[in-house]
Image (cartoon, grey):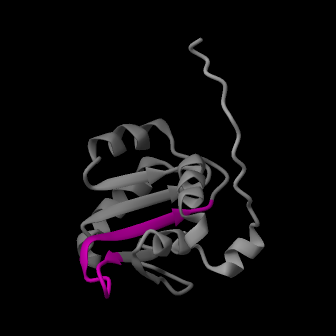
Amino acid sequence: MDQVLRAQGYHTQVSTPGPDGGVDILAGSGTMGFQSPKIAVQVKATSTPIDVTVLRNLQGVLKNFGADQGLLVSWSGFNRAVLEEGGRSFFEIRCWDQMKLIDEFLKVYDKLPDDIQAEIPLKRIWTIVPDLNE
């Protein structure tokens, strides 16, 4: 996740192992990362969809970290309450499930460090798509 944000042009700081205060990654724009948007990222790797308390916790700590917005990333997705409340928090928090994370990863793949590209070797293949409107 950190490398995807870096490839998007953010400067990042990853929390050290242990209690992180509700934020795993801090990301900022600009030459040194001081410009907006400043993003507080919470990453969850669980086997079940994330519930709304995680979203609310992230909302609650944004100011503590001086963040403008939050990003909640969950490989296992989100329950209905998160999606509903997340929709109302559109300008404050984004929620990325596994499909969105993969999409963002693919968008910046060519900008990722060589070691990540070596670990996940992908090759772009072009193909002609038939016009389905004919």
The residue shown at (34%, 69%) is 39
The residue shown at (48%, 48%) is 51
In this view, the residue in front, 46 or 28, is 28
Q: Is residue 13 above or below residue 131?
A: below
Magenta residues span: 28-45
**Residue 73, percent across and down?**
50, 58
Q: Left or right of 89: which side holds 110?
A: right
Q: Left or right of 84: which side holds 43?
A: right
In this view, the residue in front, 115 or 79, is 115
Find the residue positioned furthest to the top: 134
Q: Left or right of 57: which side holds 112?
A: right
Residue 46's image quarter?
Answer: bottom right
**Residue 74, percent across and down?**
55, 55
**Residue 89, percent across and down?**
28, 48
Q: Main secondary structure of the magenta part?
A: strand
The residue shown at (52%, 57%) is 104
**Residue 48, percent across and down?**
63, 48
Q: Is residue 29 above or below residue 50?
A: below
